[in-house]
Amino acid sequence: MELLYFLIIGGIAGWLGGQIMRGGGLGILGNIVVGIIGGIIGGWLFGLLGISAGGGLVGSIITAAVGAVVLLWIAGLLKK
């Protein structure tokens, strides 16, 4: 059940990151991958800055979405 929860949060966060940075989604698998990596980056950044997005589903999605935006921003810089 935790794996399903993890994948759903990753998919939502990746989709949000894609909407914010590119104006569209990245496909289901792309959204999940970006969201999962974004969750790791967002958790690291929030911990580094001492910020808490709150617990539960909404806090996890916010953290992962912020990380996904950062990941897509860095990927955009490297593409140029």
Image (cartoon, rainbow, N blue to C red):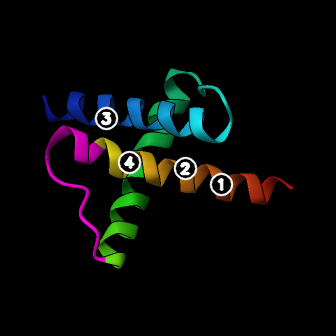
Q: What residue type is labelled 4?
A: Ala
Query: Which corner quadrant holds the N terminus?
Result: top left
In the picture as drawn, the residue positioned furthest to the right comes out as: 80
Q: Do the residues labelled 2 and 3 touch (CB within 8 Å)?
A: no
Q: Residue at x 29, y 69 (%)?
A: 51
Name the outermost residue toward the top: 28
Q: Which residue is drawn at 35% across and 77% down?
A: 48
Look at the image and give the residue range highlighted in magenta.
50-60
Classify the position of the C terminus by image quarter. Answer: bottom right
Q: Are the two marked residues, 4 and 3, in contact with CB atoms closer than 8 angstroms?
A: yes
Q: Is residue 52 a member of the stretch shown in magenta?
A: yes
Left or right position of 78 against 9: right
Of the numbered discs 4 and 3, the one sitting upstream in the chain is 3
Residue 5 coordinates in the image, percent (x, y): 21, 31
Label 4 – label 3 distance at C-alpha: 8 Å
Query: For numbered disc 3, what is the local secondary structure?
Result: helix
Q: Mark 1 points at which residue?
A: 73
- In the displayed structure, 39 sits above or below 7; it is below
Residue picked out by circle 3: 9
* Residue 2 found in image quarter: top left
**Label 4 belongs to which residue?**
64
- Mark 1 or mark 4: name the one nearer the start of the chain: 4
| Sequence-first tag of 2 and 3 | 3
- CA gap, disc 1 and disc 2: 6 Å
Distance of label 3 from label 1 (alpha carbons): 20 Å
